[in-house]
Amino acid sequence: MPDTHDILLLQGGARTQFAMIPLNLLTPGAVGDYALTGVWARAAYDEAVLVGKAHIAADTREADGSYRRVPRSSELVLDPAAAYLHICSNNTVYGTQWAEYPDTGDVPLIADMTSDIMSRAVDVSRFGMIYAAAQKNLGPSGVVAVIIRKDLIERSRQDIPTIWRYSIHAKNASLYYTPTTFAVAMMRHVLEHAVAIGGISAIETTNREKARRLYAALDARPEYYRLPAAVDSRSLMNVTFFLPTTDDDKRFLAESERRGMVGLKGHRTAGGIRASIYNWVSLADVDALVELITEFGR
Ligand SMILES: *Cc1c(COP(=O)(O)O)cnc(C)c1O
């Protein structure tokens, strides 16, 4: 992380940031650009609309209400004077992810990385702000990591309630309110563990291999498994798929539970199966699922 940026550890969830971003950065007359790629991205936009002016830079929602891909850079309709472009780096519910981040020129890029932070190397200098609620890849819920460019902190609104200002948290080294000490301490253990196992490059290598094995097992049986995510938008964190019928989905889930796997049911709004293979899911765990996918498909 370059010196141009600051790290804040704030309380709440990613949803708290959905509100804090427009509260701080939508100064009177300013517009926030939003790329809508799923429920989280849309929820962030919905908050901005309550606070100021927000503009939809892209919307990949399909007629059936689902999202299968992230937009190509050429599809983004950006306001050159926008205060920022907000994207959701990994769309947890649908299993899509930005493989490459868009080039926004002078417009600060803000990314919700709640479900893929520390899963792969990221060039922080390209972002105005990165934020992540801890609970998927960093530690327990309650703490949100905010990596924000210092000039954005300086530019942010001072006429909003004190507790919502990035500037007050930066000035007080995130100690303006009493921190969620347990969550922060646990996050520190997670970070130390990450360093001990080789840091982000080692984690990224494992994550890519985990995703490769899962997608390969599913792609090997296209007549049985249907993958909703477009190939170039496939997530390394959440692998989503459907069996031929919802009854098959249920049988698959029952068998997975019998084998000691939990949480494979797709998000209630998306259905199907979702394997969330966040940083701390091991290659051995993924191999167990690959075995089930292969046997079941056969
Ligand atoms: C889980 C998730 C959220 C919601 O986080 P909360 O801390 O519950 O508000 C937001 N964005 C993404 C990308 C998520 O995966």
Image: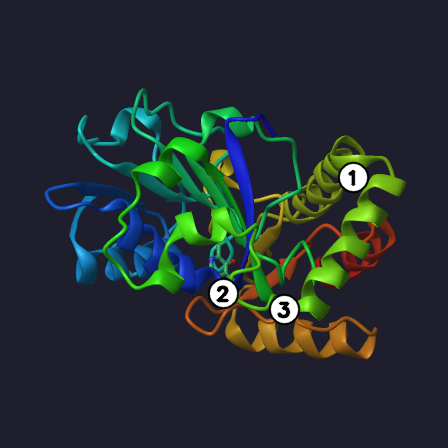
- Whichever of callouts 1 and 3 sits on the residue coming sooner in the sequence is 3
- Whichever of callouts 1 and 2 sits on the residue coming sooner in the sequence is 2
Residue identified by numbered label 2: 13
Q: Is residue 23 visible?
A: yes
- Whichever of callouts 3 and 2 sits on the residue coming sooner in the sequence is 2
Q: Amino acid at mark 1?
A: Thr
Q: CA distance from mark 3 to mark 2?
A: 12 Å
- In front here: 79 or 255? 79
Residue identified by numbered label 1: 206
Q: Residue furthest left?
A: 29
Neighbour tally class for label 2: few under 14, some 14-19, many 20 plus, Cα within 10 Å: some
- In front here: 77 or 260? 77
- From the viewer's perspective, is residue 207 above or below residue 65? above
Q: Amino acid at mark 3?
A: Thr
Q: Is residue 61 visible?
A: no
Q: Which mark is residue 180?
A: 3
Ligand 1 contact, mark 2 (Cβ < 8 Å): yes
* Identity of the residue drawn at 74% across and 35% down: 200
Query: Which tag is nearer the camera, tag 3 or tag 2?
Result: 3
Q: CA distance from mark 1 to mark 2?
A: 27 Å
